[in-house]
Amino acid sequence: MLDVKRINDTIAAISTAVALGQGSIAIVRVSGPSAERIGREVFSIPGTQRWESHRIIYGHVIDPTSRERIDEALLLIMKAPRSFTGEDVIEFHCHGGLICVQRVLELVLSQGARRALPGEFSQRAVLNGRIDLTRAEAISTLIGARSRRITQLAMVSLTGAVYKEITCIKERLLEQLAELEAHLDFEEDLLPLDERIVKNNLESIYQDLIQLVMDSNRSAILYRGLEVALIGRPNVGKSSLLNLFSRREKAIVTDLPGTTRDLLESEIIVQGVPITLVDTAGIQFTGDIVEKLGIQRSRQAMMSADAIILVFDLTEGWTSAEENLIREIPEGTILLIAGNKSDKCPLRHNTPVSKIFNQSWIFPVSARTGEGEDSILSELLNRCGANENQDIRLSLNSRQRDLAKEAATFLNHTLITIEQNLPIDFWTIDLRQAIAILTELTGENISEVTLDRIFSRFCIGK
């Protein structure tokens, strides 16, 4: 937990990704009351460069004890309150890789800073009023974005759109609450309360809140992505289709049945939606122990997948093996059927397929030529409702969405109370609850424990 004493600490962390031999620049961020002192002690500045806020100065990181030069670097200085955290902040822009940046961080820590907790820089920015909680969460979403569409929605939130929308809804509720409380306290001095107008106002606010929740539900697929299992009997082309969709030789492909013995995963982005494709072992009767384990995992993948693409070989036609597989698919699972090798045997009206399905449900594809790839992936998004997110202007994350739904529930209780002709003071009970929850959503009234839990999911250095 970030207690008062820790808030006054000076913290430090590497703020860029670190990998051996990767990245020419790495950043060590330091924030807190001792940031400037630490910077002056470990950074040697040649010439007449001045130590001023919002300046970048050139120099060397030096061990103040041994006078060893650790790295050649640039130092960015940002004095409070004009920094991301609202505190004194310095950043060492040093050479990338693993060793140099780690040595710079260790040197800073030896001078009295402590390692920052995950998300602690952002948490301080919120606590110091530099950004609101929804903007901080948008930063985390932006960093972890898996597609361009997610970055677009995150940028909308980062500009304050979520905060403004929720604040607007909350202000409308506060205005209505103030009117109700005025009638409770000064009823004899005011005109009679028009219950119809109150109800209409609250219904309008409720619909706006529900619409925001519905849009966020639709866009949730962008954040978590889809898991799609490729299933079928052995040697029908599942691995070849995985390689086609992922644009690389992810799976080993041979003419021998049972080549795939374990699950293979590959992530692709289709129209902004992250999709994890799972290539499964061909399901058949076998005495091979290893192959049996692979088939068992295939069945587990079928149970957990959001959607399934059942692959069969058009040159061999639809068989009893496919019929048996259909029966194993969990009820309610989105299913597409891919007839592979359409370059050798086009799908015709007389192609024998399951009586359960209309022939228009079968997608002819060719793992060799790429025929049918766009059609089946587009239909996959349609079936999963992923295409519906393209017109979403604003989206809440899972925490915000849960709180918005909770606030909407209390608001609905208020409307029910009005319909039941209960006294006005009963109306205000649930109304206050809805307002309190929306205040928690924006971070204006949130417990320290909850705040710690939110920022613990952030990356270190942010």
Image (tube, rainbow, N blue to C red):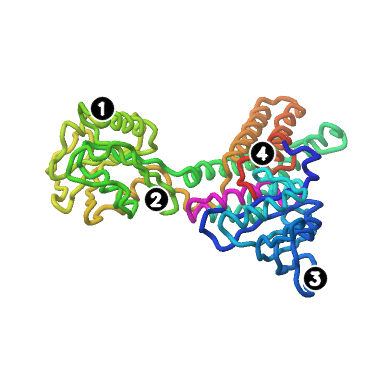
- Write the start and end of the magenta stretch as one range: 128-150
Mark nearer the N terminus (2 vs 3): 3
Q: Disc 4 designates what residue? A: 202
Under mark 3, the amino acid is Arg
Question: Mark 2 Cα within 10 Å, few/some/many (few <14, many 20+)?
Answer: some
Helix, strand or loop for disc 1: helix
Under mark 4, the amino acid is Leu
Instruction: Give residue 268's mark.
Output: 2
Marks 4 and 1 close (CB-CB < 8 Å): no
Q: Nearest the camera: 109 or 239? A: 109
Residue appearing at x 76%, y 58% in the figure: 64
Q: Disc 3 designates what residue? A: 50
Mark nearer the N terminus (4 vs 1): 4
Mark nearer the N terminus (2 vs 1): 2
Under mark 1, the amino acid is Ile
Question: Mark 1 Cα within 10 Å, few/some/many (few <14, many 20+)?
Answer: few
Instruction: Give residue 289's mark.
Output: 1
Helix, strand or loop for disc 3: loop
Q: Position of residue 190 (x, y in %)?
A: 84, 38
